[in-house]
Image (cartoon, coloured by chain):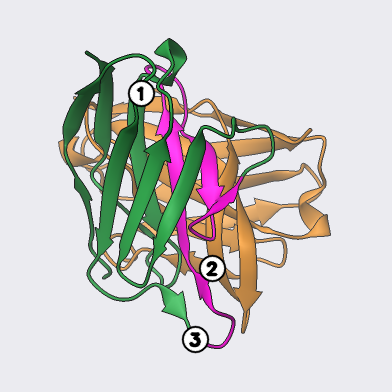
Chain colours: A green, B orange
Amino acid sequence: DFVMTQSPDSLAVSLGERATINCKSSQSLLYSSNNKNYLAWYQQKPGQPPKLLIYWASTRESGVPDRFSGSGSGTDFTLTISSLQAEDVAVFYCQQYYRIPHTFGQGTKLEIK
Amino acid sequence: QVQLQESGPGLVKPSETLSLTCTVSDYSISSGYFWGWIRQPPGQGLEWIGSINHSGYTYYNPSLKSRVTMSVDTSKNQFSLKLTSVTAADTAVYYCARGEGETYNLAPYNWFDPWGQGTLVTVSS
């Protein structure tokens, strides 16, 4: 299985500051034939299902604020929130869909400092 | 917009079979896509259980494959999950979701959107 490891496990960021979450895959998620990285990011608030934020590593889902951005390629990926808002408090997960079984990172809990 | 809703017993006894159904609204399952089940034990992360398409092609997580069966009922616009021989380790919130992305050689390469609200299934005697 592809193992997805997120860092840090938790972080606290001040309102208006940048938050950065990392995701590392045990194997490359870049498919050379189409130059796409098979990685998605989700946000999960308490008591709610995960919400899709990003797919293809950097494509923002429709309706997701542009303060959320995804970057990276191969095995190393980053989710960045450019200016943290109070409503962004949540747990964030990465997910690879390059290979079955699809696997998720362990989650990163984001809080307000 | 498409909506998904899980239904089924919230309490299952050890060694018995967990059965859940996902009802899809505002989109016909027959039109395409893979449809997935993902679970989340209390306070823990997400685990993909498997996915099924409208034709009944299934892909399961190898860690659960021996105990999992998924099926689809296009006439009811539903798909279902059965997990046999459950233990306390199967206690989780179970989500259904639509798989988006690519299908290649009939296999899904999917992220998931949207998701149902989830249903907590507790395994206990």
Give percent across and percent down for residue B88: 17, 35
Q: How far apart are marks 3 and 2 (CA)?
A: 15 Å
- Chain under label 1? A
| Res B50 quadrant in image | bottom left
Q: SS at mark 2?
A: strand
Q: From the viewer's perspective, is B3 left or right of A88?
A: right
Query: What residue did someone put label 2 on?
Result: B109
Residue A37 place in picture, x, y as percent: 47, 69
Left or right: B33 in relation to B28: left
Q: Is residue B85 above or below residue B61?
A: above
The spot of residue B83 in percent (x, y) is: 37, 49
Residue drawn at the location 45% of the way across and 64% of the way down: A97
> First in sequence: mark 1 or mark 3?
3
- The answer to whether A15 appears left or right of B85 in the picture is right
Q: Give the number of the mark in front: 1 or 3.
A: 3
Residues under numbered marks 1 and 3 in contact, where contact means CB atoms less than 8 Å apart: no
> Residue A4: x percent and y percent?
25, 58
Q: Mark 3 points at which residue?
A: A32
Q: Which residue lies furthest to the bottom in this view?
A: A33
In this rendering, position of residue A69 left or right of residue A23: right
Q: Which of B9 and B41 is in front in this view?
A: B41
Q: Mark 3 lies on which chain?
A: A
Q: Give the range drawn in magenta.
A: A32-60
Where is mark 1, residue-wise?
A: A90
Q: What amino acid is at disc 2?
A: Tyr
